[in-house]
Amino acid sequence: MRLFSLLFLLLAASTLCAQQKELYYDADWKPCDVSKASFASFIIKTDSGWVMSDYYIANKQIQMKGLFADEACKIRNGVSVWYHVNGYLSSYAYFKNNKKEGACYSYHDNGMMRDSAFYKDGEVTDTYLSWHRNGVMRDSIKRLNDSITVSVSWFENGAPSQAGFFIGGFRHGKWKYFHNNGIIACTENYQYGELLEAAYFDESGKEDRFATGDSTDAVYKDGEKVRQRKMYSKLNWPERYRLENTNVATTVVDVYLNEDGKIIHAQVVVPFHPEFDKSVINAVRGIDNWIPARAKNRRIPFVMRHTVRFKQPD
C-alpha cells in the first residue's frame, strides 16, 4: 500500500524526466526508504537554479515547490509555495539568498488568510497582520518608524488580547493583557525589555496578588499517559485494508484548542490514507479534557502536534 501508484508516477513524470535527485522522507521529515516514506522530493536543475518539488505520497498532492540557489536546496532564492493536505494554498513567499523579500502570505486550511506582510532583507518593513481561522483579526504589528513598533492582538471572539510598544525590538512602557471577556488580566511596565513592575487581575477584574505571568502549555487533566491510552483505544484499523512493506500507519495532526481548553479544530498535516486519517482525527477529537494554556495570567489558545502511529492487527 505504501508503494507509489501509477497516478503518482504520472503526476511526477515531467519532473522525473529531467530529474537529478529523488529523495524520500518519513512523517518526521527524516530521510528514509521509499516503503516508509510520507513525502517524496524531486530536484531538477534549471536555468534559474534548482527546483525542488515535494509531494504528499498518501494523496499524490504537491506539498511544496521552491526555487533554490544551490544543489543541496538549502538556500531559497526565488518563489516558494506550500500547500495543505487538502490542496489549498498554505503559504507563498519570495526569497533572496534565504531571506524573505516583498509580499508574503499564508492561509489556513479552510482558505481563510492566516497572515500577510511585506519584507525587506528578511524583516517586516511596515505592517504584519494575521487572522484567526474564522476570519477575525488576530495580530496587528505596525512599525511607526525605524525604532518604534506598536503591537495589538485579539482573541477569536474579537475581544482584545494584548497591546503595547516595542522600542528597538524590546518591550517598552506599559503593556496590557486581557482575559477573553475583555477584562484586564495583567499590566506590565518595561524599560527597554526589562520588566519593572506587574499587576494581575482575575476574570472579574479583582487584583490577584498571588498570580504570575508565567506561560504554560495546555495539558491533559488526567496526564499524558492516560491521554495516550484513551486515544489509542479509540483508534479503529480500517477492516478492508492490509499494508505491505510495513505494519505501521503514521498520521500527523495539529490540534487547535481555544481559551477554554476545548478542541475547535483538528487538521491532518501528514496524511497516510483517508480512512486511517479519519480514524486518527476521530480519536484525537474524542480526548477533550484539557487544562488551557496560560500566559500573562489569562487562558490563551494553543496548538499542539500529535504524531499517531498504530500497528496493523495480526
Image: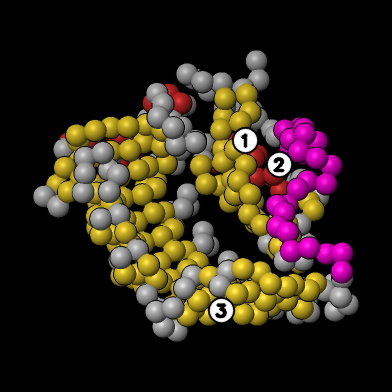
Q: Which residue is mark 1?
A: 308
Residue at the image position 73 percent from the left and 76 percent from the top = 187
Quarter of image, res 310: top right
Q: Residue furthest bottom?
A: 144
Residue type, label 1:
Val
| The C terminus lies in quadrant | top right
Front label number (3 vs 1) = 3
The residue at which mark 3 appears reads as: 165
Q: Which residue appears at 62% of the width and 35% of the height?
A: 308
In the visual, does 124 lie left or right of 217? left
Judged from the image, the secondary structure of the residue bearing numbered disc 1 is strand
State how far apart marks 1 and 2 are (Cα): 10 Å
Q: Does residue 151 appear in this view?
A: no
Disc 2 residue type? Answer: Ala
Residue 311 drawn in magenta? no
Q: Is residue 286 visible?
A: yes
Q: Residue at x 25, y 59 (%)?
A: 96
Determine which residue is flagged by label 2.
283
